[in-house]
Image: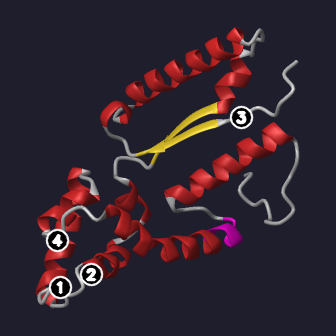
Amino acid sequence: MLDATPTALVVATDAENRWATPEQRERERRALLEAIREEVRSQGADIGHDYLDFLVAVHVWGADSYELANFTDDELVPAIGRLAAGRHDAESSAWQQELRSQLETARAAHDDVKVVLGRMKLGNPKVRLAEELWPLLRTKFEREWTAGEPVTPVVKLIADVRRIYHRISGIRAMVVPDRFDA
């Protein structure tokens, strides 16, 4: 018997590179399963296939990158605009319309938001963009969590991770109502 609580591995990523297709994601997941199984065996134990299969999950946001999957244009435009603060054209309606057009093009092509940032001559300030979007994401999370209706992909991911946690630990958190079990 292992004298430790099992650990789940959840990979959350954009559908790109080695995670681009369902087949590639499954191949990567299976490689992770085998690496874990080998490590457990090297410690003199074994782990059942069904249980290990449950402990390793791969999530993507769909065809879009994280930012485009989790935020609307109406949410992204002001945040990206704040990144461009100080540029003389960034507050103009023409610049904002061009940004909206670039976001629309990126969504249609399933490009990463960094493509939009580059075309708008902002470089690649994805970390700064994440910082700008954090308060909005927190508000979305609180609203969707309280309503018990996750719609935003990252909020759905959190609900899935919470289900995994409950199954592993055998307890139900009392702090936040559990409305995502349907």
Report x, y in % for residue 131.
43, 71
Res 55 quadrant in image: top right
Q: Which residues are magenta?
A: 144-148
Callout 4 amino acid: Ser
Separation of residues labelled 2 and 4 (CA atoms) = 14 Å
Q: Which residue is mark 4?
A: 101
Callout 3 amino acid: Thr
The mark lying in front, picked from 2 and 4, is: 2
Q: Residue furthest front?
A: 43
The relative height of residue 37 versus residue 22 in the rendered view (above or below) is above
Report x, y in % for residue 87.
15, 85
Task: Identify the residue at image location x=58%, y=59%.
Answer: 155
Instruction: Compare marks 2 and 1 and give the one earlier in the sequence.
Output: 2
- The numbered mark at residue 7 is 3
- The numbered mark at residue 90 is 1
Q: Secondary structure at mark 1?
A: loop
